[in-house]
Amino acid sequence: MRGIRLFRTVQVKLIIIYVLLILIAMQLIGVYFISTMKTSLTASFTNNLNEQTNMLTVLVEQTLGSAEREQNEVPDEQLGDDLSSLLSSLFNFSQADIQILDASGKVLATSNAQQSYVGRKNTTLAVSRALQGIRDNEQDIVDEDNVRKKVIARPAFDNGKVVGAVYIVASMKELFETVNRINRIFMSGMLIALGLTGILGILLAHTITNPIKGLTRQAAAVAEGRFDHKVPVYGDDEIGQLSHAFNNMTGRLQEALSANEEEKEKLASILANMSDGVVAADEYNNVILMNRRAREMLEVKEGTGTPLSELIGITDEKVTELQVGIEHSTVIRKELDGGDEWLLRITCTPISRRDKSMAGTIAVLQDVTEQEKMERSRREFVANVSHELRTPLTTIKSYIEALDDGALEDRDLAGRFVGVIRGESERMIRLVTDLLHLSRLDSNQAPLRRKAVHVREMLEEVSDRFSFQMRQKSIGSSVLIENGIENIWIDRDQIDQVLDNLMSNAIKYTMDGGHIEIAARKPDAGSIAISVKDNGIGIPSKDLARIFERFYRVDKARSRNAGGTGLGLSIAREIIKAHGGTVELESEWNEGTTVTFTLPTLHEGSQGS
């Protein structure tokens, strides 16, 4: 398997291609060269043999000429000896058999190796054709020893008459041995050339593949997130340009990834710190992402993979309606322990692909419990203000109509009606004054005018202001100041208003013969707590949480008859908050009420809130 992978490498492929190209080129050159050389050697051998045969044929024609033979009457033995001498002295073909034949085909003379053929007839086809006067008698044969030979039979003429023939059988062994030696030399040279080509191919492929390997290593490093290394550039060729482009790409990719990581971190930080919950779902409405606030709202540790409808507690049909319907938001309600209600607004926004198909959904969760409470308080506030104003206005209108109908003639009755109208008018004035005061406190338009105030003096003056009212109901009072408390840096007029509201409430709801205690103590070194305690009718526990709300009354009819507007405790709380303090109320039904407000002990020149 490793060998297979090796042959798939670019370096080996380049070497193989390079070697194959050289091999094919050399094979083509070798085939052409050897074929041409063989043809040339064969042609040269044949031409030389033909020249020798033609020369021998001329001599034979002269020797066997009828005129010379008739004149000299040379016997056949003498003629054979002459021809043999001629062959041995003039024609010495290496590895060639030569026969000189008369007109009947009888061998007159032959080469030394073929003396046994003298006197015999040669009946070969080539000889028969030559004795018939056919000049072109050449053929290639392969003998029993697998040796290729060239056969030539040439007729000898005398005055146009065939008087004999020359028959030559020449071995071509040396020629083909020469060709084979040249083949071996060529093959050896080709193998040496291929070896050198392979080495050069390795070196050449290395110069190409080494930069590619560097690019591969760098690409793997980039894939793993390591951008610190650069690909070396070895030149200005294509690979060098590729390396340079890859380095530029790596730098830009690093910048893009860094920017993307920063954006992801920003997005993750925004999602993690959002006051609203965010839930992302895929196209199948399975949750894929939740921020911390969403998990807190839905009280889950990990909701990934949960269906969106199951996570937020609505039906699949409702989720689909929120995604594709006109209204994309809804409010779900949940009952909490103690009878309170928790409200959650869910807004679903579909995420679309470029082809307009839905890729997922983003659900934004908003806790609107406090918002709903504020809206309810606003509605109640408007209703209470309207009610508080309508009651005295209705009374004033009734009494004015009564006066207009004739009660004005009765002075006693008219005086009593006018007194009622005056009282209702003053009540509306107090209501409007308290509302304006609250408005200034809410909008920070009631600046504090702090000054050093002696605590004992301030509390004793409060007790003195209400002494007449307390004597009317036989209510006793006491002022208790803890040791070490002297001055406090406050707005005396506003704190007096707080104390007056608390004292007024304590007197109203304390039975005849009761007792009111005004006390000041230091809960710690940086604050002073002032409390107004009575042993009156108290406040039911169910009303304690709302006692500081505007216009809230425990017993509305009784409170209204007592002349209150329902804003006193609200104004007191806003004034204490403006001083940077806190106010608390403790009460039990039929046992009494204690209201305590704590103020920071600032000194002259300090900047309070």
Image (spheres, grey):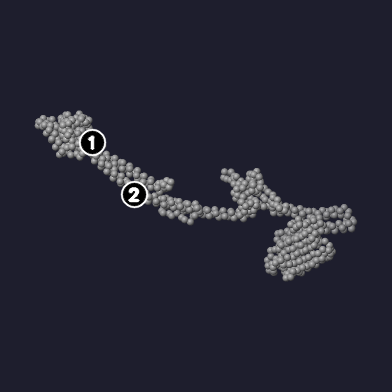
526 with respect to 192 (left or right):
right
Amino acid beneath label 1: Lys
Where is residue 588, by image quadrant? Answer: bottom right
- Name the residue located 66 percent from the left edge and 45 percent from the top edge: 315
In the rendered image, which quarter contains the C terminus?
A: bottom right
Residue 574 visible in the picture: yes
Contact between labelled residues 2 and 1, with CB atoms less than 8 Å apart: no
- Name the residue located 74 percent from the left edge and 69 percent from the top edge: 482
Amino acid beneath label 2: Leu
* Residue hosting label 1: 150
Percent coordinates x, y for residue 471 in the rendering: 84, 65
Residue 450 visible in the picture: no
* Residue hosting label 2: 196
Where is residue 32, by image quadrant? Answer: top left
Instruction: Tell me the SS state at disc 1.
Output: strand
**Disc 1 to disc 2, C-alpha distance:** 42 Å
516 and 501: which one is in front? 516
46 with respect to 387 (left or right):
left
Q: Earlier in the sequence, mark 1 or mark 2?
A: 1
- Neighbor class of circle 1 (other Cα within 10 Å; few <14, some 14-19, many 20+) is some
Percent coordinates x, y for residue 371 in the rendering: 69, 53
Instruction: Tell me the SS state at disc 2.
Output: helix
Residue 32 — which label? none
538 and 95: which one is in front? 95
* Numbered marks: total: 2
Percent coordinates x, y for residue 564 in the rendering: 79, 58
Percent coordinates x, y for residue 589 in the rendering: 79, 58
